[in-house]
Image: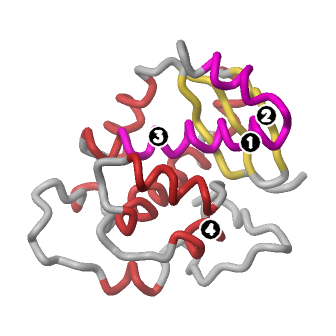
């Protein structure tokens, strides 16, 4: 289990595993053949992007942007990102040792990885190709957004031409 990553200016309505009340309800309509039920998550559970930004290490605008570009509905994105974030959070020390951290912000750390790393992550968490691509796009959009905030956008965009990024929520320490 990952530690609570809430900062004082963020509020969440999650239980200890990071699930919201909407996650507990689930949605088994059977209309999505690419359901990720094997991963133990319900990626179709609806969630407000602003609410998701409170519990995930992504800016709300990043979630909206990634949702618009992804081939999955915006409402499904938080359900894809939550289990991935738990998986990554459990391995943050490994990322700190093995990958280049390009930015540390109060509530997240950003690491450059080989693009094939996303295939491994998707396999570990049980994401299909569309969910994997949506998650990768979200992480890359956060790098670009953070680059703009820190006046490093051109540097980060150049890095994304040959690498990818993993964003991991982190405590402010």
How packed is label 1: few (under 14 Cα within 10 Å), some, or many (20 or more)? many
First along the sequence among labels 4 and 3: 4
Question: In the image, what residue occupies the spot 74% across and 68% down?
Answer: 6
Above or below, 78 against 92 in this view is below
- Do tag 2 and tag 1 residues touch (Cβ < 8 Å)? yes
Q: CA distance from mark 2 to mark 3?
A: 18 Å
Nearer the camera: disc 4 or disc 3: 3
Viewed as shown, does residue 128 lie left or right of 59?
A: left
The mark found on residue 55 in the picture is: 4
Q: Position of residue 142 (x, y in %)?
A: 63, 44
First along the sequence among labels 2 and 4: 4
Viewed as shown, does residue 144 lie left or right of 28?
A: right
First along the sequence among labels 1 and 3: 3
Q: Position of residue 144 (x, y in %)?
A: 65, 36
Question: In the image, what residue occupies the spot 13% across and 77% down?
Answer: 29
Question: In the image, what residue occupies the spot 59% across and 72% down?
Answer: 50
The mark found on residue 146 in the picture is: 1
First along the sequence among labels 2 and 1: 2
Q: CA distance from mark 2 to mark 1?
A: 8 Å
Question: In the image, what residue occupies the spot 69% across and 25% down?
Answer: 156
Which span of residues is magenta-colored?
A: 133-159
The mark found on residue 103 in the picture is: 2
Q: Position of residue 19 (x, y in %)?
A: 48, 75
How packed is label 2: few (under 14 Cα within 10 Å), some, or many (20 or more)? some
- Do tag 4 and tag 3 residues touch (Cβ < 8 Å)? no
């Amino acid at each position: 289990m990952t530690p609570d990553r809430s900062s004082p200016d963020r509020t969440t309505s999650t239980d200890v595993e990071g699930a919201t009340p909407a996650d507990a309800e689930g949605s088994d309509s059977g209309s999505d053949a690419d359901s990720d039920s094997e991963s133990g998550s319900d990626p179709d559970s609806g969630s407000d992007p602003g609410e998701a930004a409170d519990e995930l290490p992504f800016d709300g605008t990043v979630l909206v942007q990634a949702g618009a570009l992804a081939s999955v509905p915006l409402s499904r994105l938080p359900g894809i990102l939550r289990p991935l974030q738990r998986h990554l959070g459990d391995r943050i020390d490994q990322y700190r040792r093995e990958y280049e951290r390009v930015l540390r912000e109060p509530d997240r750390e950003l690491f450059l990885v080989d693009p094939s790393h996303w295939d491994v992550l998707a396999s570990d968490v049980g994401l299909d190709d569309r969910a994997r691509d949506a998650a990768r796009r979200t992480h890359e959009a956060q790098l670009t957004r953070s680059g703009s905030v820190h006046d490093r956008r051109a540097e980060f965009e150049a890095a994304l031409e040959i690498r990818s990024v993993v964003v991991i929520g982190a405590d402010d320490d």
